[in-house]
Image (tube, grey):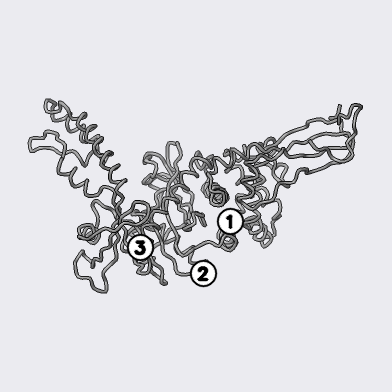
Amino acid sequence: MSRPAGDRVRPGGLVSLGLVVAFDFGGTWLLDQLWVRLGVGAALRGVAADRRIDGDTTERVLFALVAQRALEPGSKLAATRWVAERAAVTDCPGFSDDSAYAAMDFLLDALPEIAARIFDSVAHLLNLDVDIVFVDSTSTYWEVDGADEPADLQPEPQVDDGTATTVEGGQRRFGKSKDHRDDLPQVVIAMAVTRDGIPVRCWTFPGDTGDQKIIRTVKDDLGAWQLRRLVWVADAGFASAANRAYLTRGGGHYLHAEKLRHTNAEAAAALARPGRYHTVADNLRVKEAWVSPGGGTDDGARAERFVICHNPEAAARDEAVRQRLIEHLQGLIEGSDAWPNRRRDELVGSLKAKPGLRRLLRRTTTGLLRIDRAAAAREAHYDGKWLLRTSDLTLTAEDLAAAYKQLLAVERGWRDCKSSLGLRPVYHHRADRIRAHVQLCWLALLLIRVAETRTGDTWRNLRHELDRMHLVTLATAEGRVAQRSALTSGHKTILAALDLPEPPKYLNFTPGADPAVD
C-alpha cells in the first residue's frame, strides 16, 4: 500500500495506521460518472436554480436515491442509512428522510422540464437514434385491502371518443393487472424507449387507466420536445383505429402488433392471404400483405400494410407447449364421463382464467368433456407467428420485424425495474410519492442501460465486479485519508469500455493528529 506524504515511520519501517471505516465505492463512483456525463446532474441543478432551490444539495440527494435503486434497493429511510453507513457518495456524507422527500417532491414538481433537459443532453451525448420510439406499459400492485378511494367515489369512466388523453396520477385503483393480480389495487406505468434501448421518459397513471389513452398522452408529451418524424412501436394492447389516426397526426407513423385470435377483419384477411415467405436474419421469415378497409382484396389507396412474421424455432416451441397443454388437459378430464354434470361445470368454470387450456376443451351435445382437436389444428396455424400493421411505407419488412423485436428491450426494462431496481414493493401510499418513486427507478434504469450498452455486459455482472471496490478511511499520525482499494482487471475493463478514468487513489485528506492511531 502506498502511504501519504508525512506519515510517521516507526522503528523497523512500519507506518502507524488505524483503520477507521470502509465504504462501498465502485458502484456509486461509476454511476456518478455516468450521471455527470449524461448531464442529469446539470439538468437538475439548472431547474433547481430557476426555482431558487439549493440545487447542489438537492441534486446530490437525488443521485444518492437513484444509486441506491441500482445498487441496493430499499426504502427511503433505508437509503439514509445506506449513505451514512455503507456507501461512499461524493459530496453527500448523509441526509435525512425529510431531505429525501423534499428532493422527490422537487423532482415530481419539475418533471416535464427536467425530463426534457435530460433527453436533450442524453440524445446529444449518445447520438441516439430517435426516429423510432417504443412504448409499453406495465403495472405494480400493493398487497392492501382496498383502493385509495371507495369505488363509489371514483370518477365515472368516460366514453373514449378516440382523442381523449389521460392525466398522470399515482392513485391506487383496481384495474387490469399485467401481473395477473386483478384482486389488488395498482398503478399503471408507461415507458418510452429508443431503438438503442435507452429509456427516455416514464409516466405513472391511476390503476384503472387503459392502454388506449396512455399512448396518446405519451405522444403529446414527447411531441412537445420537437422531435422529427417518429414511428411509434407498440404492442397489441395499444392498437385501435382511433389510436392509429392519433399517432399519424403531424406526419408520424405507427407500427403495432395485431391480435392473432378474435382480431379485426383487416388482420384476419392479412393472415389468410397466400404468399411466399422470405428469410431474413435471425431465422426469421416475413411476407407482406396489403388489405383494404373491412378486409377486402382491393389494393386501393386506402389499403393498409401488414407484415406477417414467422419464426420456425418459436413455432416448434409453440407446438411443444400445446402438446403439453393437451396432455395436462387430458389428465384433468380423464374419467369425467362418470362425473355428475355439476362437477363437469365446475371444471369448465375453473378454466376461464386459463385461456390456453380453455381453447382446447369442448363439450359434446350431451355435456361430456373432450379435447377439441379442431381447435388444436386452428392453433397450429398461429405457431411462431406475429402480425404487424404499419403506416410507414419506407421501412422494409425486415426493418419492421426487427423494430418490433426490439420491443422486447422495453419488456426487459420492466423486468429490471421490478427485480434489480426494486420497483416493488413500493413503500409509499401518497399518489405524488408513488410517482416520484417511479421516476427514481426510471433514472436508475437510464444509468444502468447506458452502462450495459457500452460494456456489452449485464448490470448484475457489472455490479458484482464493482462491489469489490471500496473506499477505506485510514488514521495516521498526520491526519486521516480515504484511500480506495486496488483496481482489479475487471474494474479496468469496465472503465475502459465506458471511457472513464480511474478513480482517484486518495480522497478527503484531513490533516492533524488522530486519536485513532495507536
Left or right, 23 with respect to 113, comes to right
Q: Residues within 10 Å of mark 2 (few under 14, many from 20)?
A: few
- The image quarter containing residue 43 is bottom right
Q: Residue at x 39, y 45 (%)?
A: 178
Q: Earlier in the sequence, mark 2 or mark 1?
A: 1
Which mark's residue is nearer the viewer, 2 or 1?
A: 2
Q: Quadrant of the C terminus?
A: top right
Left or right, 299 with respect to 280, comes to left
Which residue was labeled with disc 3? 243
Q: Residue at x 46, y 65 (%)?
A: 131
Q: Amino acid at mark 1?
A: Asp
**Mark 2: secondary structure:** loop
* Relative image position of residue 212 (x, y in whole percent): 36, 57
In the depicted structure, whether residue 486 falls above or below residue 389: above
Q: Quadrant of the N terminus?
A: top right
Q: Amino acid at mark 3?
A: Asn
Q: Residue at x 39, y 41 (%)?
A: 179
Q: Residues within 10 Å of mark 1 (few under 14, many from 20)?
A: few
Q: Amino acid at mark 2?
A: Gln
Tag 3 and tag 2, C-beta contact below 8 Å: no
* Relative image position of residue 438 (x, y in whole percent): 52, 48
Which residue was labeled with disc 1? 109
Left or right, 25 with respect to 514, comes to left
CA gap, disc 2 and disc 1: 22 Å
* Relative image position of residue 492 (x, y in whole percent): 65, 45
**Mark 3: secondary structure:** helix
Which residue was labeled with disc 2? 226
- The image quarter containing residue 349 is top left
Q: Residues within 10 Å of mark 3 (few under 14, many from 20)?
A: some
Instruction: Count the marks.
Output: 3
